[in-house]
Every structure is written in structure tokens, then in C-alpha cells.
Image: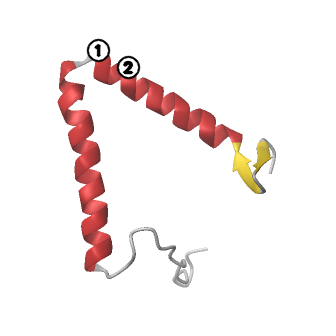
Amino acid sequence: MPLNVRWRGVEVPVPAFVGAAATFGIWIVALATHEGARIAGPAWLALGGAMYVWVRIRAEIGLLEDLEAGELPQGAE
């Protein structure tokens, strides 16, 4: 795929890293400049993380376990 680089034997998508860094930077700026974001931002992330853990534990799936995609229903292609 174009714009990928090999790092330690693994293909790494450069646009994904640029996007992640930009998103993180914007989040930090929002936390620094917006009082409501200082509370809502970390609370939203904590809630999402807790929900992820709860769903995975309830479904008896490991937190870092990969899942195989199921088959698509007929006509969903």
C-alpha cells in the first residue's frame, strides 16, 4: 500500500500515525483552552474504556484477543 513504511519488519501506515498525532495534539489544545473539556474529555475516555472492558469480560473475550469477522448476511455485499 502506498505511504507505508517498514519498521521492525511490519508495514506501518504513515497517514494513520500522522492522523493520530494530529488528533492527540488537538485534544491537548482543547484540554488546555476549554474548561469543560478538562472534565468531559478524560471522563469520556474513561467511560469508553470501562465500557470496552465490561463488554469484553461479559462476552468472555480477552481484552487484547483478536476476533474473526463473521459472514455477511445474504445481499450485504
Q: Nearer the viewer, residue 16 or 53?
A: 53
Q: Quadrant of the C terminus?
A: bottom right
Direction from residue 2 to residue 20 in the image, left or right: left
- Amino acid type, label 2: Val
- Amino acid type, label 1: Thr
Mark 1 Cα-neighbour bin, 10 Å: few <14, some 14–19, many ≥20: few
Q: CA distance from mark 2 to mark 1?
A: 6 Å
Check contact, mark 2 vs mark 1: CB within 8 A: yes
Direction from residue 65 to residue 75 in the image, left or right: right
Direction from residue 42 to residue 65 in the image, left or right: right
Q: Which mark is residue 29?
A: 2
Q: Residue placed farthest to the front in the image?
A: 8
Mark 2 Cα-neighbour bin, 10 Å: few <14, some 14–19, many ≥20: few
Q: Position of residue 61 (x, y in %)?
A: 38, 79
Residue in the picture at 54% in, 77% down:
69
Which residue is labeled 1 in the image? 33
Q: Which mark is residue 41?
A: none
The image shows residue 68, relative to residue 14, as above or below, that is below
